Amino acid sequence: MKGIAYGVGVGPGDPELMTLKAIKMIQENEVIALPGKEPKETVAYKIAVQVVPELADKTLVPVYMPMTMDLDVQRENHRKGAKVIEQYLEEGKNVVYLTLGDPTVYCTFSYLQKIIEADGYATELVSGITSFCAAAARLNIPIVEWNEPMHVIPAVHKLESSLDMSGSCVLMKSGSHMKEVKEILRASGKSVQMVQDCGMDTEQVYNSVDEIPDDAGYFALIIAKDQ
């Protein structure tokens, strides 16, 4: 029998927010794939190993897919990554791919999943706590109430957005263009808060647009709510 490829969310950063199911998946499977060139240097590994120390002794498989806006290069990297995983699936071994947050939200495993399934292998997803839910909890606020809509926006790709929609906006992937994103936020008139590196040792909380640094990091998550 062929193995199954699992996309497993390890949560936003705090190891205590890993699910029991994610822990069990790591404990019960030998082959663990991680998104990066050096598995033990990945954020997902550093989170999970705090809860599952035996992860260090597993078969750690690097799946390196560097960020690029070149779609052809992206597709080639996804194909290479899928082939790395499929080598183990063909041997009848399951592969547990660890990812930050939840594997259904802006996750690199999504691209691999489509290829792996098209090549005739089975996949399954194991949900994890999303970064925006963890950030809202850290800020001690609800993201939405009653009949308010919530909009999740990859800000780096939506710099033309005016954020004039009603309800709450969650802005992800904002770090590399934070200066432009801040101008959009100011013009929106919304109440703005940001958590960077939520749940990690380097976590920082900002309670207004003016507090947010222009050089915010990749794991910067903004919640903008109607006032």
Image: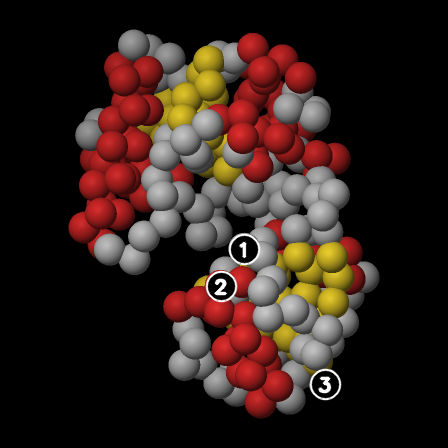
Q: Hey, which quadrant is residue 24 in on the image?
A: top right
Q: Label 2: how many residues lie within 10 Å, few (<14), some (14-19) or many (20+)?
A: some
- Relative to 43, say whether 158 is above or below: below
- Mark 2 lies on a secondary structure that is helix
- Judge from the rendering whether residue 159 lies leftward or rightward of residue 116; answer left or right: right
- What's the amino acid at mark 1? Tyr
Please report the residue visible at 58 percent of the width from the left and 57 percent of the height from the top.
217
Q: Label 2 vs label 3: CA separation?
A: 27 Å
Please report the residue visible at 37 percent of the width from the left and 31 percent of the height from the top.
63
Q: Mark 2 sits on what residue?
A: 176
- Judge from the rendering whether residue 157 lies leftward or rightward of residue 129; answer left or right: left
Q: Mark 3 sits on what residue?
A: 227
- Mark 3 lies on a secondary structure that is loop
Residue 13 visible in the picture: yes
Q: From the image, which quarter does the C terminus lie in?
A: bottom right
Q: Mark 1 sits on what residue?
A: 218
Q: Which mark is residue 111?
A: none
Labels 1 & 3 near each other (Cβ < 8 A): no
- Relative to 92, say whether 80 is above or below: below
- Relative to 61, say whether 11 is above or below: below
Q: Label 1: how many residues lie within 10 Å, few (<14), some (14-19) or many (20+)?
A: some
Q: Earlier in the sequence, mark 1 or mark 3?
A: 1
Coloring applied to the structure: secondary structure
Where is residue 179 shown, x and y percent of the image? 54, 75
- What's the amino acid at mark 3? Gln
- Judge from the rendering whether residue 35 lies leftward or rightward of residue 15; answer left or right: left
Labels 1 & 2 near each other (Cβ < 8 A): yes
Where is residue 42 shown, x and y percent of the image? 53, 34
- What's the amino acid at mark 2? Ser
Q: From the image, which quarter does the N terminus lie in?
A: top left
Q: Earlier in the sequence, mark 1 or mark 2?
A: 2
